[in-house]
Each structure stands twice: as structure tokens, then as C-alpha cells.
């Protein structure tokens, strides 16, 4: 790979960028993982989170939503003693609250994937940025709407900026810059994984 988006700084960034960032994902476990990790990243570098990712997978039951939703206060206290994750009480408690919210979302929409992808009409948005850091936005009307809807289900650490980062991470938005070798690959994957358009529950986006 000769060209990458100009946010890449570390080897961990590069591996994540080359293999995962912007690849369309409709897997509920992965979507929940990214929702938790993007929330954990608030105020920190993404490299910090990537370096702790395996610890998060171990401690959060490989991001099994049902398992995390059952975490007790005692479990949360134990997590806060582990240096392998970001030991911020609000963020750890948010992960559990968000798991419970995802269960409610699944009940109403069938899956977390169906719900979040409805905010881009089921298809990845293909953007055209010459340089990522100089041109890509921090949020969009779609991320505003997703943030509002997630908050309506009781989610925490899901502001619009976090939601936009989540959308980029799971390929709802292809924000690879124009000279990046991954841009065309993600666009091609978007065509192969295209799903029928869905509409979010009107109550969720009101």
C-alpha cells in the first residue's frame, strides 16, 4: 500500500485502516463493538483504543450484546480495576446501558444493523475528499439523526461526532481520501453488500 488517508499515524492505525475502516459491516456483534469503542475513544486517540482492543474483547465477552447487558454493578467495579481498558466509570457504565438499549432496538427493528443502516437508506455514502483531515466533516445531518435516535433508546456517549466516527468505521460512509488505495476497494464492497433500503421507526428519528 503506497497511499493511505492522512489520519494514519501508527502501525496499529495502518493495520486497522487497511483491513477494516470503511468496510461495510452489517454484523451486529461488530457494530456493537464499534459503538462501545468509539464511545471509549472520546477525548483520547484512536491508537490508544486500538492498543486496548483485545482487552476490551476479553473483558466484554467478545461484545456479546446479551452478555454485556447482564453485567452487574459488581462486574462494572471489577472492570474498572483492569488497566487493559479505559478505566472511566461513565464510559464503562455506558457500554452496559448501550447493550441494553441495543436489545430494545433489536426488538423493534429486527437487528442493530437494520436500524443504523436505515440512516443512510441502506447504502454506504461515497464521499470524495482530497485530504481526509483537511476536508472530511466531524458530523453530518445523518449522524445528527442517528445520535438523536440512539439517545432516544437511552444510549450514552453517542453524540453526533462519535456517531459519525462510528459510521465511518463500519462503512456506512466511505471517507477514504481520493488517493487512498482503500477507497475503491470499499466502494466495490459497498456494491456487493448492498441491501434493500429500510426506513427507521419514525418514533426513533422524530
Image (cartoon, rainbow, N blue to C red):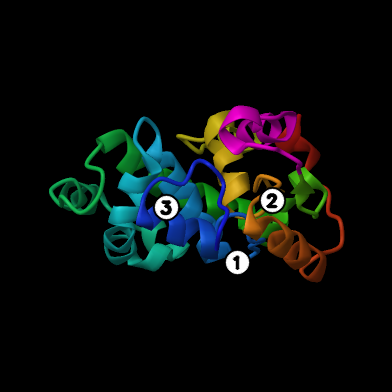
Would residue 185 be found to the left or right of residue 34 on screen? right
Would residue 81 be found to the left or right of residue 90 on screen? left
Q: Earlier in the sequence, mark 3 or mark 2?
A: 3
Point out the frontmost of discs 2 and 1. Answer: 2
Is residue 200 visible from the viewing direction of this image?
Answer: no
For this orientation, the residue located farthest to the right is 196
Which residue in the structure is indicated by mark 3? 13
Would residue 61 be found to the left or right of residue 139 on screen? left
Is residue 177 visible from the viewing direction of this image?
Answer: yes
Which residue in the structure is indicated by mark 2? 172
* Contact? badges 1 and 3 (CB < 8 Å): no
Which residue in the structure is indicated by mark 1? 27
Q: How far separated are the C-alphas under marks 1 and 3?
A: 22 Å
Q: Residue 157's image quarter? A: top left
Point out the frontmost of discs 1 and 3. Answer: 3
Residue 80 lies, with reference to residue 63, above or below; the image says above
For the N terminus, the quadrant is bottom right
Q: Who's the residue at 40% across and 45% down the image?
A: 9
Highlighted magenta segment, given as a residue range:
127-148
Question: Mark 2 Cα within 10 Å, few/some/many (few <14, many 20+)?
Answer: many
Amino acid at each position: 500500500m503506497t497511499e493511505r488517508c492522512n489520519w494514519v499515524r501508527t502501525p496499529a492505525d495502518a493495520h486497522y485502516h487497511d483491513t477494516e475502516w470503511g468496510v461495510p459491516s452489517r454484523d451486529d456483534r461488530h457494530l456493537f463493538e464499534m459503538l462501545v469503542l468509539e464511545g471509549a475513544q472520546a477525548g483520547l486517540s484512536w491508537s490508544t483504543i486500538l492498543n486496548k482492543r483485545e482487552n476490551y474483547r476479553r473483558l466484554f465477552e467478545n461484545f456479546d450484546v446479551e452478555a454485556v447487558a447482564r453485567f452487574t454493578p459488581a462486574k462494572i467495579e471489577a472492570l474498572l480495576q483492569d488497566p487493559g481498558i479505559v478505566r472511566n466509570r461513565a464510559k464503562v457504565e455506558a457500554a452496559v446501558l448501550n447493550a441494553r438499549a441495543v436489545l430494545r432496538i433489536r426488538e423493534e427493528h429486527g437487528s442493530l444493523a437494520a436500524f443504523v443502516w436505515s440512516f443512510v437508506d441502506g447504502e454506504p455514502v461515497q464521499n470524495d475528499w482530497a485530504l481526509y483531515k483537511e476536508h472530511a466533516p466531524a458530523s453530518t445531518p445523518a449522524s445528527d439523526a442517528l445520535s438523536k435516535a440512539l439517545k432516544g433508546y437511552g444510549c450514552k456517549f453517542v453524540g453526533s461526532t462519535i456517531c459519525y466516527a462510528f459510521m465511518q468505521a463500519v462503512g456506512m460512509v466511505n471517507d477514504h481520501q481520493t488517493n487512498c488505495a482503500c477507497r475503491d476497494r470499499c466502494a466495490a464492497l459497498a456494491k456487493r453488500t448492498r441491501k434493500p433500503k429500510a426506513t427507521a421507526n419514525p418514533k426513533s428519528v422524530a
